[in-house]
Amino acid sequence: MRFISTRGKTPPVDLGTAVREGLAPDGGLYFPERLPHFSAETLEALCGAPTSRVALAIARAFLDEVPAAELGALVADSLDFPLPLVSVGDDVHVFELFHGPTLAFKDVGARFLARLLGRLTSLDRSETPLTILVATSGDTGGAVAHAFYGVAGTSVVVLYPDGQVSPLQEKQFTTLGGNVRAVAVQGTFDDCQRLVKTAFGDPVLGEQIRLTSANSISLGRLLPQVLYYFIAWTALDSRTDAPTVVVPSGNFGNLSAGLIAKRTGLPIGRFVAATNSNDTVPRFLRDGVFDPRPSVRTISNAMDVGNPSNLERIVHLYDGDVAALRRDVVSTSSDDSTTRDAIRVVHDRFGYVLDPHTAVGWAGLAEARAHGEVAGPAILLATAHPAKFRSEVERVIEAEVALPTALAANLDKPSHAVRIPPEPARLAELLVQVKKR
């Protein structure tokens, strides 16, 4: 399979080039040149199969450059934790994607990417270290840092908005040290994302450092996320109705992956792209005008994105046809009060504890149903463990949330973060310093 830029000004490239470059030279995002198609018979044959078998069957169609045995090992190693589908009420199936090392859905993509890049780096035999530059509004930083921690030939630089991620999230990537450098940017997540894009577009910096991305803009993050939509669907007890899939959305990489899965034949009804108060995409679908605004802080901080990068991939998939996109996606926006209400209601009614991001999804589903935009069974992607937001959740449900060992182990470790202003020159200086270490 070859990969093209969403902006159409870069020739098709192979998998290795797309993954290593992160952004295409024309500033676009890499996307499969042609999508595979999975027949109903193929999908039915996978129903009830182990996670690794389902994932490998789908991955082969996208990653045909990787030898079968290597791909099988890569998939099995990346998905070596449970992905349970839990019924909450009669017609909502919560797909718990948070049982990986950092207790967030991003472990899937980050672990896959780390292993894929490790293979590609060993093949090119380059002696120049690879610097993985990533911006995070919460969970990406921990997932990427842990996935690449200690990996030979790599350095990881994590940018995050100073004071705007939860303390437990921050501990997950600022306490590692080693080949991981945490950088607190004195600004918003949008500033962090802008710094990353500027660094990738800097030809002088590119001559000094081998940069690649581990954000959701990375093709190596996007493709493994496609896999778990198939895993969720094949785990359903009944597939008589095409389910609604609810995706808590910030930078919209997760929704991009879901729409790709649908386009390749997975029988999904509509998507609910549930956002918090950062409502750029709901307004875009309503008005047809892309009008990004500065991000605002919410209790679902990993989704505090005012200018979602992956909307470019979605628009590309639909050839710019917003009306067609509206037929597949309804997008909602919930403020913090509504998010807290969702946490409280689900706990009181069903005894199930949602984190704030998944609660945004629950609230979005309720809104879409109330307006008659979706009906029938739904799969809700649960993107983070509630303990990562323990203080907020405990205040809402008035009960204790147990702290998993993976989180408790970081509490007393010192932070190694450095702070910089949101200035490209300062980041470039830091990246050169990291390379020399």
Image: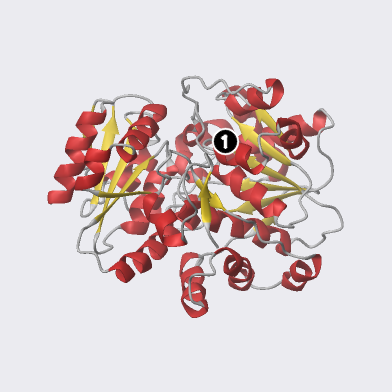
Residue 287, given in percent of the width and then of the height, sits at 69, 20
Q: Quadrant of residue 64?
A: bottom right
Q: Residue at x 81, y 38 (%)?
A: 374
* Local secondary structure at mark 1: helix
Q: Residue at x 81, y 52 (%)?
A: 242
Give the answer, above or below, for where 363 lies relative to 230: above
Question: Which residue ends up furthest to the bottom in the rendered image?
Answer: 69
Q: Nearer the viewer, residue 107 or 427?
A: 427
Q: Is residue 405 visible?
A: no
Give the answer, above or below, for where 223 lies relative to 428: below
In-image side of 22 versus 392 (left or right): left
In-image side of 282 versus 182 (left or right): right
Q: Residue at x 46, y 76 (%)?
A: 70
Q: Nearer the viewer, residue 384 or 240?
A: 240
Q: Quadrant of residue 185?
A: top left
Q: Is residue 274 visible?
A: yes
Give the answer, above or below, for where 223 lies relative to 375: below
Residue 270, given in percent of the width and then of the height, sits at 76, 42
Neighbor class of circle 1 (other Cα within 10 Å; few <14, some 14-19, many 20+) is some
Q: Residue at x 43, y 45 (%)?
A: 24
Question: Which residue ends up furthest to the right in the rendered image?
Answer: 240
The residue type indicated by label 1 comes to Leu
Assign the N terminus to one quadrant of the image: bottom right
The residue where tag 1 is placed is 311
Q: Nearer the viewer, residue 95 or 155?
A: 155
Q: Quadrant of residue 194?
A: top left
Colouring rule applied to residues: secondary structure
Residue 139, given in percent of the width and then of the height, sits at 44, 44
Circle count: 1
In-image side of 287 versus 327 (left or right): left
Residue 73, given in percent of the width and then of the height, sits at 47, 75
